[in-house]
Amino acid sequence: MGAQAPSAAVERTAIKKVSVRLVPFVALMFFVNYLDRTAVSFAEPNGMGQDLALTAAQFGFASGIFFLGYIVLEVPSNMALHRFGARRWLARIMVTWGVVSLLFTWVSSSGGLYTLRFLLGVAEAGFFPGAILFLSQWVPSRHRTKILGLFYLAQPLTTVFGAPLAGWLIGRHGLFGLEGWRVMFLFVSLPAIILGVVAWFYLIDKPADAKWLTPAEREWLTTELAAENAQKTGHESQHAKGALKKAFGSGRVWTLAAVYFGFVYGLYALAFFLPTIINGFQEQYDTTFSVMDKAWITAIPYLPAAVVLFFWSRHATRHGTRTWHVAGPAVVGGVSIPLALYMGSPAATVAVITVTACAIFAALPVFWSVPSRFLTGAAAAAGIALINTAGNVAGFASSYITGWLKDWTGAYYVPLYLVGFFMLLSAALMVWLAARDRTGEPAPDPEHQAMEALR
């Protein structure tokens, strides 16, 4: 009893310090990252679409080609992060994406838009899985859902604060002789460059080097993480070739990639087309919205989503992550998104879309606590990057297919039904994966044990 009390106190203070010192800063990086990649969704209905003569399919392609660029360097970037350290690599990513994002201020054609969106994906490649990997290397698995939940709050809050900010910047039409949407690109790009420089000096690669931890806290974190990693993999996982073989040869990794595909398909269908759908309310319901009205309406679904994300992650942390923490929200999102098509007013439509947003964001941080349960070191870098690559494929597919189907059918009915289908498929795959491990022949490997914990 006497030995356990000091250990519990050290654990509590160590996790608190990581939560306060690292998570808010990395979350701020994610906030700027997500704002930069989705800024095009605010620009399109507020002048860019007209100025560049974009159809819905062209806008969808421009939105989605970002993910093709991201995919090109996704796994290599995360392997480089593992080799060179998160501090250097995340800082490098932020500065390069900030510079590319800045160039959108002067884009003048659809071809130029496609090129810059592709290059933005190349520049950003590896940031999100790198951030997930970085935070996962600072806390034991039992604390990971909480930490990732706090980090993930940045994504819905980006729209809560970013949409009104984008609307306000667009309203500065004429500043420096620029159209409003160009002013927005100018000012949302600069924070990435600034944060990248700060990250070089602020971030620390591992607990053993953190001077803001006490010696006892450093020792506890280092010992816990080392013991956990030793249980998950052997020494061969630290070599790049063995790590890639382990990650790419894991059926669980590929299944989790398919699960993530469905969630991200829904996430980016909403992220890129919700402002356009809201803009269409004016003709559909014979009403008029100002730029700021549309910005605030766009933000509405994401504030409740942030609240649900926080409490859902907290519940999973306290009671243990279970299959239904991921599959349940997928079912709710899959059923609710098509229902939005049949609402009779803007308020009712946005209310149902809010339910979908809550479902998607509730599941994502819990989902990301799963891969690091059975992968570590270079294998974790490769596996997490592979799973995120599937999400980037979904980002491209949902953006382009949603726009193409809208042009083809003249409405968003078919595109949103497809969103519902993929989210329900994610739920089914998550349940199947957990059921397979329960009914299969027991095996003492870490992958089997990790999935057993999801019962």
Image (cartoon, rainbow, N blue to C red):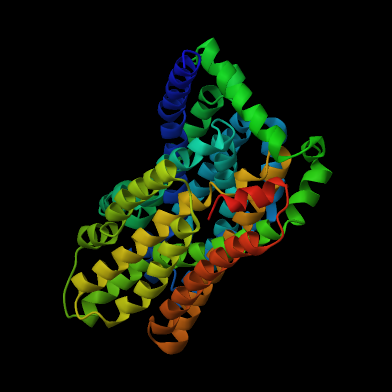
- Return the residue nearer the eye: 372 or 102: 372
Query: Count the marks: how many?
Result: 0
Relative vertical location of residue 310 with respect to residue 44 in this rendering, above or below:
above
In the picture provided, is 318 more to the left or to the right than 398?
A: left
- Return the residue nearer the eye: 409 or 152: 152
**Rendering coords of residue 209 (x, y %):** 60, 17
**Rendering coords of residue 326 (x, y %):** 47, 58
**Rendering coords of residue 344 (x, y %):** 20, 81
**Rendering coords of residue 407 (x, y %):** 45, 83
**Is residue 55 in view?**
no
In the picture provided, is 445 more to the left or to the right than 267?
A: right
Relative vertical location of residue 443 with respect to residue 207 in this rendering, above or below:
below
Relative vertical location of residue 42 with respect to residue 309 in this rendering, above or below:
below
- Return the residue nearer the eye: 307 or 48: 307
Q: Residue at x 77, y 50 (%)?
A: 246
**Is residue 330 in view?**
yes
Q: Residue at x 50, y 67 (%)?
A: 427
- Return the residue nearer the eye: 185 or 152: 152
Residue at the far front: name it: 1
Locate residue 281: give its quadrant: bottom left
Residue at the far bottom: name it: 409
Q: Residue at x 53, y 63 (%)?
A: 395
